[in-house]
Structure formats: C-alpha cells, structure tokens
C-alpha cells in the first residue's frame, strides 16, 4: 500500500539570530502492507507529522521516492489524494457547521455519487447520527475526532492517514477510538498513524517504525522490536514460573536501546 525510500525534508527557520536549516526528515524508509495498522512512533519533533504530510501530498519532499496505492508521490498527486483519507492533528472540524453538513460537503468535493447518502452512512458507522445536526463547537473532543475521521473516510478510500489521532483525549475516548481504528482494519482499510503514546503503538499497530530526529531507528512488529532488545532485560521469576525477558520489555526499552535515551524522558508520553 505504501512504499517509501529515502524520504527527506529540510526547512529553513528564521529567528532573531538569522536563518538556519532544520532537517525534519532525513531519509525515511517505510513499507506498509495492505490491511495493516502501521504506526510511526516517536517524540514530538521527530519528523512524524512532516512524513505524513508528505505522504498526503501536502508537502513536497526534497529527496526520496514514494508509491502510495500504486501511484507515484511526485508524478500522480491527484490520484493519491483520491486514494487516501487524511486526518490532521487539528482534525479540521468547523465550529459553526453541523457534522452532517461538513461530511456531506467533503463527499461532494471527492465527487461521491450520492453525497448525502455517503455522509449518512459514515456518520452512522461512527455512532454520530444522533449528533449529526449539531454545530462543531458543541461537540466533545471524542465526538470531534470521530467527525474528523468521518470526513477522511466519506469517499471510502483504501488508505487512511491519522496524525496523532488521540492527542488530548481522555482514556475512555482514546480506548473508544482505538476500537474504531481496529474496526477499519477489519473492514479492509489500511491505516498509517503517527503517535507519541507508547501504549497506543503497542496496542494498535501490526507493525511500526520508531523515529527520532528524522530517521527510523527501529522497525518491525511490537513483539519483534521488544524481542530484539530483550537480552538487556533480566529474566524474572514471579510465583515460581519463569518469564521470558521480552514479556516485560517495553517499546520505551527499544527506544532507549536505539537512541540512548528514554522516550518518556522526552515528554512525548506525558
């Protein structure tokens, strides 16, 4: 579904001491199979959002190649936009318009044959039918996130990009959104999500890339990544039975082993 090789992006930042260059993404490689939930895990500033915005065709990469849903990132951006849904950190839910009006308008923009019907179906799918006629400003954080995902899915794309989808949500709403993302995978939608929550990556992702300072420092299933560093974790005996070291190794242990610092110490998992 996604094949990325050497994706790179540098920004120029202007400040009181003049201009400087910031290497936001420094040669990222990703392979996302159809039907997967694939995570990009790392602290704030690691390059996660820049990577997803490049794949969403919102930012042009400085170097590297990518194929998304069979289309070339640089040569076929229009085809890629039709093949994916994108939900930013902000979500994009308007304050004044109703959820129904916003989702219906999105369906029209995507050229859906029956915009109203498509909006009704996706709103019902995310348990939003009862609040569909309320303006965005009256919705809770969890409801706004679900409306944002409905906006990204109204045209039934095979791929959904989620940038920090649960940031700011309470534990109950976060767990509810996890269930929704799992349902999308079960229904055949491929999902690429960025997160700085360790437990979110561990609970949701079939595979993930751990990124730091714009590079991938580790890649694999959560179990594979923990197994790779489990030799550094002592075996415990609890109530008699012996537990394998990787049974209690965490993704934070993986991050520490690959970068020399804890992901929690970055403040990303507060």
Image (cartoon, helix red, strand yellow):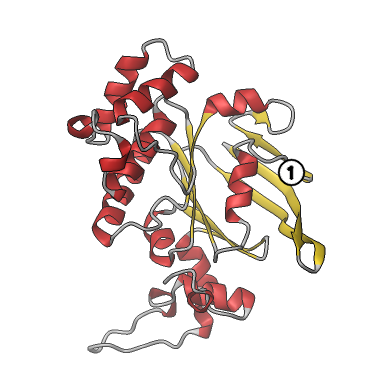
Q: Position of residue 161 (x, y in %)?
A: 50, 41
Query: Is residue 183 among the parts visible in the rendering?
Result: no
User: In the figure, residue 189 lies in which quadrant?
Assistant: top left
Point 27% across, 22% down: residue: 120
Residue ranking furthest to the front: 16
Query: Is residue 162 among the parts visible in the rendering?
Result: yes
Point 75% across, 58% down: residue: 13
Point 32% across, 41% down: residue: 146
Q: Position of residue 86 (x, y in %)?
A: 50, 37
Q: Nearer the viewer, residue 257 or 135?
A: 135
For the C terminus, the image quarter is bottom left
Q: Nearer the viewer, residue 100 or 200?
A: 100
Q: How many marks?
A: 1
For the N terminus, the image quarter is top right
Residue annotated with mark 1: 61
Q: Nearer the viewer, residue 197 or 223?
A: 197
């Amino acid at each position: 579904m996604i094949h990325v090789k050497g994706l790179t992006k540098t920004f120029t930042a202007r400040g009181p001491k003049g201009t400087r260059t910031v290497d936001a993404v420094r040669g990222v490689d990703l392979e996302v199979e159809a039907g997967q939930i694939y995570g990009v895990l790392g602290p704030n500033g690691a390059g996660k959002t820049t990577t997803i915005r490049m794949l969403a065709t919102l930012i042009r990469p400085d170097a590297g190649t990518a194929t998304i849903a069979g289309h070339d990132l640089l040569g076929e951006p229009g085809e890629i936009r039709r093949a994916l849904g994108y939900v930013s950190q902000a979500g994009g839910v308007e304050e004044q318009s109703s959820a129904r009006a916003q989702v219906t308008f999105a369906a029209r923009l995507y050229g859906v044959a029956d915009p109203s019907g498509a909006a009704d179906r996706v709103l019902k799918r995310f348990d939003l039918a009862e609040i569909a006629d309320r303006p965005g400003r009256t919705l809770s954080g969890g409801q706004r996130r679900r409306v944002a995902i409905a906006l990204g899915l109204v045209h039934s794309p095979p791929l959904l990009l989620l940038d920090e989808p649960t940031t700011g949500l309470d534990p109950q709403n976060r767990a509810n959104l996890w269930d929704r993302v799992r349902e999308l995978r079960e229904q055949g939608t491929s999902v690429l999500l960025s997160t700085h929550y360790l437990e979110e990556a561990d609970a949701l992702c079939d595979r993930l890339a751990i990124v730091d300072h714009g590079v991938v420092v580790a890649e694999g299933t959560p179990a594979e990544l923990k197994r790779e560093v489990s030799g550094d974790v002592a075996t415990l005996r609890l109530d008699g039975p012996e537990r394998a070291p990787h049974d209690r190794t965490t993704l934070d242990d993986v991050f520490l082993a690959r970068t020399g610092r804890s992901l929690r110490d970055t403040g990303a998992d507060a």
